[in-house]
Amino acid sequence: MQGPLIESLARQGVSRRTFLKYCATLASMMALPPAAGLAMAEAMAAARRPSVIWLPFQECTGCTESITRSHSPTLEGMIFDMISLDYQETLMAAAGHQAEEARHAAMKANHGKYLLIVDGSIPLGQDGAYSCIGGRSNLEILKEAAQGAAAIVAVGTCAAYGGIPKARPNPTGAVSVSDIVKDKPIVNIPGCPPVPVVMTGVLAHYLTFGSLPDLDDKGRPRAFFGETIHDRCYRRPFYDHGKFAKTFDDKGARRGWCLFELGCKGPVTHNACATAKWNGGTSWPVESGHGCLGCSEPDFWDAGDFYKALSVPAHPPTSVVAAPMVGATAGAAAGFANRAKKNAARKARQPITAADLEK
Ligand code: SF4
Ligand code: SF4
Ligand code: F3S
């Protein structure tokens, strides 16, 4: 444990006002009442920084890159100071035996109290030989580190569900953290990579309330994964009016029409991209002109052709039925049908102009 967060933020030039505003935004994104923003700010400002052990396993470093936002100092990046990152082999200066010693020392000093973050899947094939650190398999290290952890955060789709390494034919026998650890609270923050502010939100919740946030049936925080991309997509009015881009460079695409027919998986994908966005709120895949690939859902890589439309009616505003979908579960299809009933109200709130609809 180290000094309070507020001191560290002040040293980096973050004012109290900026911090309060940030906490209010975070609370609102997590659907907490307005007063929770202040409570969160006070709790985080005073909190002693908990020890965090971060284990990168079979991964591509995309998750680490996304979450540390190394390209620019942002408040999300600085708020990482609310934890004491005692081990992260990609980021830490120490290497080899020194790094392993640092991990063991932090685990011993904070036994039962540290937060364990994992990114990457765990390969079980060939006795775990596909990914080892210091001659020990990821499986061995995970079991050891999980023992003394208060809770585990599985960051990225690889750690949460196996991700791309688990894609057919899964040559390394990749599995997720929850396939291995059964006796600790685990929160999944999927995404390939995950949205940075979701990670910050989960850490802020843990510091404020001392517990993990409410989770859905796939272990994801409901506050960020409770709605689909499609629910919050700014192209949704075009979907509701049956205006679809047919190619990535046609007139519809240039006018920002819906990418459903180009394979967008937004209707069956739960994530916060449409509201949180990326790179300090600059953009996100659909705003950049590409459909959602469904990267925060289990087995998204094997779920079907990325460029083939989901098999639901193309003009579903008030009459969609729970038809089988390519790459979607029946539950997702039913949810999609239910949400379609709300479209009339949504259309009234988000009118589009005659010029937008012009062919
Ligand atoms: Fe890389 Fe995606 Fe796996 Fe993260 S979830 S480690 S970005 S492949
Ligand atoms: Fe947005 Fe994709 Fe839904 Fe169209 S199908 S509204 S592009 S999420
Ligand atoms: Fe992934 Fe879709 Fe967001 S592909 S990054 S969940 S828009």
Image (cartoon, rainbow, N blue to C red):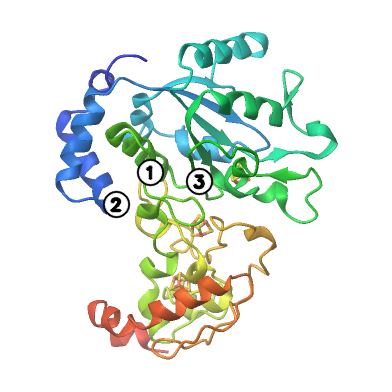
**Quick one: SS at disc 2?**
helix
Q: Nearer the viewer, mark 3 or mark 2?
A: 3
Foreground of the two, 208 or 170: 208
Q: Is residue 298 left or right of residue 340?
A: right
User: Residue at the spot x=54%, y=46% of the render?
Assistant: 193
Looking at the rendered structure, the kind of residue marked 1 is Val
User: Residue at the spot x=55%, y=83% of the render?
Assistant: 312
**Quick one: SS at disc 3?**
strand
The residue tagged 3 is 188
Marks 1 and 2 sit apart, C-alpha to C-alpha, by 9 Å
Residue 90 visible in the current orientation: no
Mark 1 C-beta closer than 8 Å to ligand 3? no
- Residue furthest out toward the right: 126
- Contact between marks 1 and 2 (CB within 8 A): the answer is yes
Mark 3 C-beta closer than 8 Å to ligand 1? no
Marks 3 and 2 sit apart, C-alpha to C-alpha, by 17 Å
**Quick one: SS at disc 1?**
helix
- Residue furthest out toward the front: 183
Quadrant in which residue 327 is drawn: bottom right
Q: Position of residue 194 (x, y in %)?
A: 49, 46
Q: Decide: is 157 above or below 260.
A: above
User: Residue at the spot x=31%, y=34% of the render?
Assistant: 75
Residue 156 visible in the current orientation: yes
Q: Position of residue 80 (x, y in %)?
A: 38, 29
Looking at the rendered structure, the kind of residue marked 3 is Asn
Classify mark 1: residues with Cα within 10 Å, few (<14), some (14-19) or many (20+): many
- Contact between marks 3 and 1 (CB within 8 A): the answer is no
The residue tagged 1 is 197
The residue tagged 2 is 29
